[in-house]
Image (tube, rainbow, N blue to C red):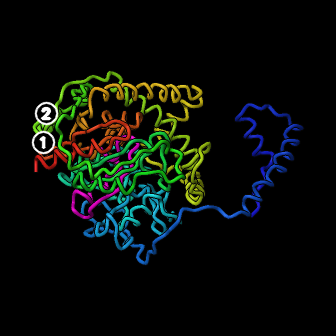
Amino acid sequence: MSVKRPGSDALQAISDYYGFDLTPGELTEFESAVADSMGIYDRIDELADEYLPVKYPRADVGYRPLGDDNPGNGWSWKCSIPGASDGPLAGRTVALKDNIALAGVPMLNGSSVMEGYVPREDATVVTRLLDAGAHIIGKTAVPAFCFDGGGCTGYPEPQPVNPHDHGRLAGSSSNGSAVVVVNDQVDIALGGDQGGSIRLPSSWSGCYGIKGTYGLVPYTGIFPIERTVDHCGPMAKTAEDCALTLEVLAGTDGLDPRQYDVRTARYTEALSEDLSGLRIGVLNEGFGIPGVSEADVDAAVREAIGVLEKAGAKASEVSVPLHSDGLALWSAIAFEGATELMVAGDGYGTNARGHYSTDLMDFYGRARRARGHDYSDTVKVTVLAGHYMSEHYNRHYYGKAQNIGRRLGAQYDQALQQFDLLVMPTTAMKAVRRPADKSLASTLAGALGNLHNTAPFDVSGHPAMSVPVGFSEGLPVGMQLVGRRWDEATVLKAAHAYQVTVG
């Protein structure tokens, strides 16, 4: 296949965009020079591409479940793909969030824009699960492009419902993963987390969910949003299953530019340790958030901290002032970063070494240009704001937010010199009702109103886990445990101790 050479009209539009002010004569010269340079692309076209391996056969690539075959609406697709005959996950069923590539199985990523896309490769996490003996039984529903913390923008309808009140949101964007776990339809599910999308649904739906330190789990083969906040991790009904799965998933694959200086551990071995001497910092700024926090949520989490104290931990208050600005920092990073990577960059962008899923880039690049009107309101407002800020303020605020984000991380690090864990509510409020209408204001309130305590740790990259700590008014409450970078073991140890103590 020969790469099409650009004509004068195309080059004139590019020239105008960059302010080159080329004369007609100059444009003709550049048209010839550009055409000559295209020969390198013809040669690249002749070379074989590199794809992630597909190690395990799949005779049953499955179907999209409907009605009674999908209680709670947590599934996007059902299939049956067994892995190795033995391993740490042998006999366990696993579900994948539907932004994770599973060869031969459709990936919607929650949007009609992606209708018809079928990956040709397996994400690294898929291969690791199957190598460990897991049996993958399906993909879980997500909101549109996973850019929704409540779970009200997904395609197709009906969307996942909260297992404890079907009139409320399950939390998102790994809402389908939480629903199938809580409803006992699968043993373990994988989620993704850019602003809290593992921890939010774990909190609102009532399961365990952990995102490790930034880069701990390879994101290779998973649909990106913003490279500096992309995380992947497990969700389950026990801390032990989260620890076991994280052992399987963690470690470098040599293909993900998010990974550097990665340090892993045998997380399950830490579960047998008691909490004697564990120092817990109760994060002041995570409680009593004006206009957001619910008093019963704060009270339930403080009661759960008391359980950890009875198990041997010692708790006292700590302040990280910049935590209150973490959501603002995250928003600036997400708006401009997602606009450039997830949208304008056709999912992958440039300027990073690692694996590029070119089949996804080709499909999505064509689809988004043809069907941009099908983007959700959350994506549209992100792109409108992000593009404007990039164009009119020279990416200044993206860069400043990243710079201040390092300071936020340093403040957490300083607190974690004094304490082993930071603790606060995962979400400051319980699950909210599904928006009564599809107005822009209702959609944005349902989708982006619950990130205050989760998004800051995507910016800083610290490991963070949601632990279910009971119910208030019939709805789950989640406690968030945050540890030092690469110290997932202590986070999981405390979560397990809480679960064992309360039975």
| Label number found at residue 299 | 2
> What residue is drawn where x is 71% and y is 63%?
47
Verify whether residue 79 appears in magenta: no
**Amino acid under label 1?**
Ser
Q: Position of residue 215 (x, y in %)?
A: 45, 45
> What residue is drawn where x is 58% and y is 44%?
344
| Label number found at residue 379 | none
Q: Is 427 located above or below residue 179 in the figure? A: above
Verify whether residue 197 appears in magenta: yes
> What residue is drawn where x is 35% and y is 57%?
141
Element at label 1: strand
Q: Position of residue 250 (x, y in %)?
A: 40, 52
| Lower position in the chain sequence, tag 1 or tag 2 | 2
**Pointer 1 with pointer 2, Cβ within 8 A:** yes
Element at label 2: helix
Mark 1, residue position:
472
Front residue (pair 419, 42) = 419
Number of callouts: 2
Category of crowding for the residue at label 2, using alpha-carbon neighbours closer than 10 angstroms: few (below 14), some (14–19), many (at least 20): some
Q: Position of residue 173 (x, y in %)?
A: 36, 48
**Residue 413 horizontal side relative to residue 366, left or right:** left
Mark yes or no: residue 20 visible: yes
**Residue 187 horizontal side relative to residue 263, left or right:** left
**Amino acid under label 2?**
Ala
In magenta, the rendered stretch is 172-199
Res 316 quadrant in image = top left
Q: Position of residue 409 (x, y in %)?
A: 40, 29
Q: Is 247 located above or below residue 403 in the figure? A: below
